[in-house]
Amino acid sequence: MPQPASSASSSSPSNPLTVVAEPNQPPQDGNPLRGFDLLIKGFKDMTLKELEANSCGGKEGRVAILQQRMGVLSRLEVDLHTFADRQAKARQIAEEHRDLVFEAQKLKEDLEASKEQCKESQRASKHWENQHRVAVNRARTAEEELKKRATQTDEARQQAEQERKKAQKLQAKVDELQKLQLQQQKVAQGSGELSKKPTKDTANPDLQGLSRKNDKLAAQLKKKQEEYQVKSLALQAATKELGELRTEVARLTTENGTVKSEIDMLRHIQKEVKAESDSELAQAKVEIATRMRQLEFLGRRYQALKADLEKTDSTLLSEKETSERLRQKIRELTAYEPLGDAEIADRIRIRNLIDQAQERLAIAAGLEPAPGESLALTWRLALGPGTNDAVRVERAKELLSGNNLSPGDIEFISNEEALHHACQSYSRFRAPGNDLHNMLDRAGYLTSLDRYLKHVHSESARAPLEAMVDYVCPTAPDPSE
């Protein structure tokens, strides 16, 4: 029959589902029901052999009981596989649920980021609108100032024109006065000639009045010329300032046009960004709604599977209790009383002890079994076809050297006699008919060892056999040490 993996440790032999990884053993399967599954297979194989043996002997009642036991084991095996499938499906649903929750959270974060981008675009748009209003206000103020200055300039020009006309009139009067002065000079020359003659009244009243009037007009003309020069300078300054204002207005008009073009471009960009953001936002909302519906569906499915899993756990607990009762029946069936021959059982268990030791040595040496080949057979074949046990022991030491050995491996290899028994080409402890070829607990091995040594009266073999028991089923370390 095939060799199942070890399903119990020396510290807890009563739990049928406990799988303890010993040092230098390959990693166990992740399925927690593997040990129990192997136990069922081993028990079925043993039951089939016992069924064949009892069928030949004509024990119909025992055959019926064994057939009934086979049916129970078959149903239990199907239930265990169904439960394992449900567990795998529940784990897959839980992983999908976690992935969807993570994806929904990511979509929410993307939505928040899109909202922040929209707010930033709105703030930028408001900023540029404020800048546009400021530029428009500046242009309007400059235009009003220009109009005001232009009005003032026109008034100054009109006033200057009036002053010019007044000046022209004054100039005409001055010219007239100059003519009068020339006439006065001529009159004065004539009067000079007359003054040579002695007369009583030499003054001419008309000439004196004209002279005073001429002086007065000259003073007024001078004053008007000065006023004209002042107003002419003011007119030149106003004209210059008007030119500067026109230049400033042209500059502000150009700047206003540039700002308007930038604002138009920003508005266009804002519209595009808003349209794109609205589209992405709507798409994200639709996707979030879809994901939320999927999440709700998976949540309901998860709750249903969780309830189903709880129900299955309850069923599994019941099956564990049933398996414990079956395990107890297995222990009862593998005891000495049902077998009817304790000596045969002891010999089988001693052979099993050697096989277990050889399997551990094969694992420690890093040997890989061929398909369908046990580790114990792989170990024996690796030692070679020779029958010289001393050569086989040396070959075993070569295989084990350079490997990462555990303290238990090192202690066993240092026991030359125990290693010799594990390397023999033919062992008197290995007899045919190993129907109970499963790893036992420490107490079972020691019981069979005591009974076997008592029967064969060979206490000299106790030390190597006990060393094998310590190697296969080491005692639990003392916590106080």
Image (tube, rainbow, N blue to C red):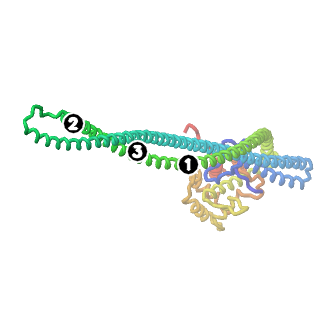
Residue type, mark 3 in image: Leu
**Which amino acid type corresponds to the residue marked 2 in the rendered image?**
Leu
Q: Position of residue 62 (x, y in %)?
A: 89, 48
Q: Could you tell which of marks 3 and 1 lies nearer the N-terminus?
A: 3
According to the image, label 2 marks what residue?
210
Residue 3 sits in quarter = bottom right
Q: Closer to the camera, 232 or 338? A: 232
The crowding category of the residue bearing disc 2, from other C-alpha atoms within 10 Å (few below 14, some 14 to 19, many at least 20), is: some
Question: In the picture shown, does residue 365 fall above or below 150?
Answer: below
Q: Which of the numbered marks, if any, corresponds to residue 59?
A: none
First in residue order: circle 2 vs circle 3: 2
Residue at 51% from the left image edge and 40% from the top image edge? 133
Q: How far across and how far down the image is residue 339, in percent?
A: 81, 48
Amino acid at circle 1: Asp
Q: For the residue labelled by badge 1, is the local secondary structure a helix, a strand or a loop?
A: helix
Q: Secondary structure at mark 3?
A: helix
* Residue 226 as seen in the image, left or right of residue 34: left
Q: Can you say whether 384 is above or below 322 in the image?
A: below
Nearer the camera: disc 3 or disc 1:
3
Q: Give the residue number, with chain letter if any, for mark 3.
A: 245
Q: Is label 1 or label 2 in front?
A: 2
Of 311 and 56, nearer the camera is 311
